[in-house]
Image (cartoon, helix red, strand yellow):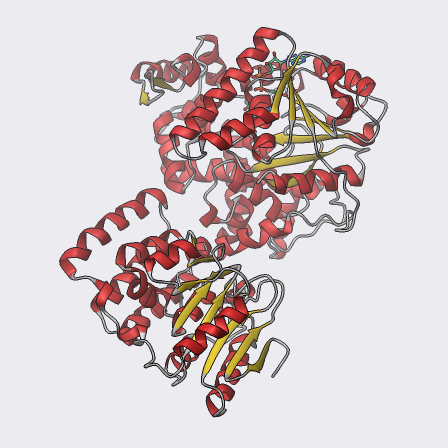
Amino acid sequence: MDDLVQLHKDGDVAIITINNPPVNALSPGVAQGVEHAIAAAEKDESVSAVVLIGGGRTFIAGADIKEFGKMTSGEKPRGAGLLPLLLRIEDLNKPVVAAIHGTAFGGGLELAMACHYRVAVPNAQVGQPEVKLGIIPGGGGTQRLPRLVGVAKAIEMCAEGNPISAIEAQKLGLVDRLIDGDLLRQAAAFAREVKGKIIKTRERDDKDKLGDSQQNAPLFASAREKARSKQRAMIAPLAAIDAVEAATTLPFDKGCEIERELFRKCLFSDQSKALIHIFFAEREVSKIPDIPKDTPTIPINSVAVVGAGTMGGGIAMVLANAGIPVLLKDADQPSLDRGIATIQKNYSSSVKRRRFTQQFVDERLKLIKPTLSFEDFRNVDLVVEAVFENMALKKEVFARLNQVCRGGAILASNTSTLNIDEIASASSRPQAVIGTHFFSPANVMRLLEIVRGRATAKEVIATCMQLSKKLGKVGVLVGNCRGFVGNRMFHHYVREAVFLVEEGATPQQVDQALYEFGMALGPLATGDLAGLDVGWRIRKEYRHLEKPGVRHAIVGDRLCELGRYGQKTGAGWYKYDENRKPTPDPEINATVRQWAVEAGIPQREITSQEIVDRCIYALVNEGARILEEGVALRAGDIDIIYVSGYGFPSYRGGPMWYADTVGLKNVYEQLCDFHRRFGELWEPAPLLKRMALEGGTFAEFTNARAVA
Ligand code: NAI
């Protein structure tokens, strides 16, 4: 046998072991290896049953995702995929038992389902997660799964892509036996039990669980409705539902043909390419050229958070959720009490929503210790500062931390706009200072921008990157500049949204166009959610830096002057009821229109296309500057920031990938048009211009200077 798949015998049971570390992906050679092993087991008369098992820490975690790219680029011919091998296994005249530990996902589960029996350790997981990559199972998964678990569960698993535990799989009939202890030994014993018995009905001929059209019609209708609302605009979930439906109406072989067709349609779509890009980009973010994987890290066993407000409270919860003890400090008792009360309220609503159990929450709350004294910080490994966004105050806090914290402790700031180097200058150990920019609500949002200061030590960066994973966040290293990556780009996006309102669009039109583009929430509704006063304060602080003669928005400031700060004041761009449900406010729309007219801004009809192009290309143009400056390491890092922190649709791959998809030449031409019509804010970024003219893509761009 070759390296990837081994065959050996345990008495009369042939053991086929797949050894393709780290996750036994179905890379080239694995399917062939299994096929050869099956053929050998068939020929060997002394073999009466077969066990198929994964070596190392898992069964087969899925396809080799790199292979999908090769298929769409034409590098790899379109084959029939796994199907012939699966039929070969199913047709074998000796029982084949899949022995599952770790995960059996995607093609891994399809392979297991083609075996005659499945046994699994209780903590194994099985699933068809393909939709998360914009595709559907392509090896008969949508046809076999409903035959094993019933139509409703198969629709859910194929269309939503979430795994189930082996325990649930056993209840559903997908796993025949749960095995505690030595999986291989007991799987071989199971194989001996079933050898010689009539092989269990071939799954593909089994129709018992497929229901009839009357029972199934409402299941398919409600699944489609759910997919349309929860996985808005995505084609794969609907294709998965269509494929499962084919299983209920067509013979197995015909159903597989339909599945294959739908699989190909999805694989060749821009959505799947974008989602696969996001999959790889998320793995890439942790690679930092000058910080190798073996960089030493600092153990983080206790943390202090300064400031028990919106962010500090959320950050304390994130840390406690990961099992890390937290000291939570505020300036005075009432603020501290308020902070703790908010944490308790948030936790109890999680219990109500069944996200956490009461016991879990009680344990977390015990980990959060309120304090008013910096003196308690002497032994902590990390401090996260989240006081008001004010440089003098932050410097005061860092000077104090410098006095009390032990050498080697990390001093992090959650600032969203301020200069990390200036904050670091307040301590005598700038190498220990770093930005950890969480997003609101900190206990929900996955993004963590990790801001590298001029002097930040590599161990400090490596530790924060590692910690982000432990906290369930995606940590992206960014350079130190105003707004870092996410907010710096967002500023341009919102600017255009407000300009569009000033030129004649309503706030609803702007938000709707971007919602239809796929954003989770339109920019103006986002402003209302975050608080319009936040941006207003920042604008006032930096007004002196604005170049004379360059247009700046006026109506956003005027709204704030009226006390319309958004949801928290019951009104902003929209009106809000006591449940914070928005409704358009015709009066304020008319007032805004009047302000714009008074300011001499010509009014016109504005199309949805213009709204999308101006807002999204504003992101792209600034993203190109950020990339060239080396503030982000890669275009993919920017995409991850936008997908995980700003509600950018993952099926469009993030703003930079989206621009690549549109074609940088097309984007550039549109920018030139905007530049001509709307002035210097639209000057194309030099990198974008160069790439458009040379025919490059952001995805290919590497910046030698980019160590942030
Ligand atoms: P907040 O106003 O809700 O909370 C600030 C807290 O700091 C208050 O409880 C205040 O009493 C406390 N505080 C002030 N001085 C203190 C001192 N000397 N010692 C201890 N505690 C002190 O503010 P928020 O929104 O939580 O922001 C905190 C930081 O996080 C700011 O730097 C902000 O820019 C940043 N940030 C805010 C985001 C947001 O959406 N609110 C998002 C990301 C970052």
**Residue at horizontal 66%, vertical 31%?**
436
Residue 519 at what x, y percent from top left?
A: 43, 38
In this view, the residue farthest toward the left is 214
Question: Compared with residue 376, is residue 80 higher up or lower down, i.e. above or below?
Answer: below
Compared across the picture, whether 523 is left or right of 334 comes to left
Question: 626 or 200: which is nearer to us?
Answer: 200
Residue sitting at x 56%, y 33%: 321
Please give the count of numbered marks on the rendered protein: 0
In the image, taking residue 73 as reference, residue 434 lies left or right, namely: right
Q: Which x, y percent locates residue 20?
A: 60, 69
Which residue sits furthest right? Answer: 428
Q: Position of residue 698 (x, y in %)?
A: 61, 51
Q: Quadrant of residue 141?
A: bottom left
**Which residue is at 43% across, 35% downward?**
355
Q: Quadrant of the N terminus?
A: bottom right
Quarter of the rendered structure image containing ligand 1: top right
Q: Considering only vertical position in the picture, is 532 above or below 367?
A: above
Q: Residue at x 44, y 8 (%)?
A: 562
Nearer the observer, 159 or 641:
159
Residue 246 vertical placement versus 688 (above, below) = below
Image spot of residue 589 (x, y percent): 34, 18
Residue 294 at least partly seen:
yes
The quadrant in which the C terminus is found is top right
- Residue 551 figure quarter: top right
- Camera sees residue 26: no
Q: Is residue 665 left or right of residue 631?
A: left
Q: Nearer the viewer, residue 73 or 220?
A: 220
